[in-house]
Image (spheres, rainbow, N blue to C red):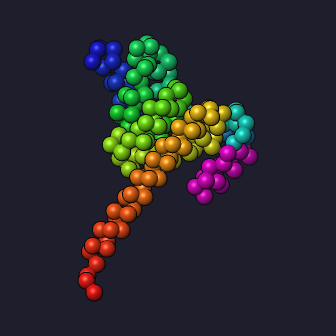
Amino acid sequence: MTNAAAELKRKVQLILSQVRPDTPFYTFRTPHLAALAAIVLRDNDPPRIQAAGDVEVTHEQVVALKTLYAQSPPNLQKDFAALLMSQSTTVNAAVIVHVIVEIGALPVLVDALKATNATDAAKRRLMWQSLRVKLAHESHRFAEGDLTAIDEAREAELARVRVAEKAATAAKVRRLPPH
C-alpha cells in the first residue's frame, strides 16, 4: 500500500469513526415535506419524493467522504468504494451506502449485497434499508440499469433468505421428539 493509499485509508477510518446512529441524512426543502417524512418514517415506509431538490443530503460524514473522494487522485478514486466497503460496520453501513451511490459506485455495493461472504446479515439488512431510503428520496440518481442491478441483488437476497428459512425449519423438525 502506497503512502497516499494508507493516508486515504486513515482519513476514511477517522471520518467513519465519527458516525453516530440515528443522525438524519436529509434536510427537506419545506416544513410540509419534513413533517410528511417524519410521519412516514415512523411507519417505516419512506415516501417517494418525485422532485429533485426536495431533499438535500446534509449528513456530515457523507459530505466529508464525498469531499475526500473528490479531492483524491484518480488512481485512489477507483478503489474508494472498495475501501469504504472494507471499513463498513453496522454503525456506518447507511453512510457507506449513501456515499457509494453518490460517487457513482453502485456496482460495488450491488456486488457486496449479492455476495454472502462480503457482508454479514445484519450489515446487509442495514444496507438494504439505506438503499431503500436513497431510492425513495433520490430516485433521480438511479438509471434503469441501476434498478435492474438492484433488483438482481434483491432476488439473490430473497433466495438466500428462503434457503436460510428452509434450513431453520428443517433443524426445528429434527429437534422435535418422535411420536
| Nearer the observer, 31 or 138 | 138
| Nearer the observer, 80 or 59 | 80
> In percent of the image, x 31 and y 71: which residue is there?
172
| Nearer the observer, 91 or 115 | 115
Compared across the picture, whether 70 is left or right of 41 comes to: left
Compared across the picture, whether 25 is left or right of 34 comes to: left
Up-down: is 38 above or below 51? below
On the image, the x and y values in percent for residue 156 come to 45, 47
Q: Is residue 38 on the magenta stretch?
A: yes
> In percent of the image, x 46 and y 21: which residue is there?
68
| Nearer the observer, 133 or 42 | 133
On the image, the x and y values in percent for residue 34 come to 68, 45
> In percent of the image, x 44 and y 13: which residue is there?
74
Q: Is residue 4 on the magenta stretch?
A: no
Residue 102 occupies quadrant: top right
Dominant secondary structure (helix, strand or loop) of the stretch shown in magenta: helix
Residue 57 occupies quadrant: top right
On the image, the x and y values in percent for residue 14 come to 36, 29
> In percent of the image, x 72 and y 40: which residue is there?
50
On the image, the x and y values in percent for residue 150 come to 53, 40
Up-down: is 65 above or below 164? above
The quadrant of the rendering that contains the N terminus is: top left
Residue extent of the magenta highlight: 31-48
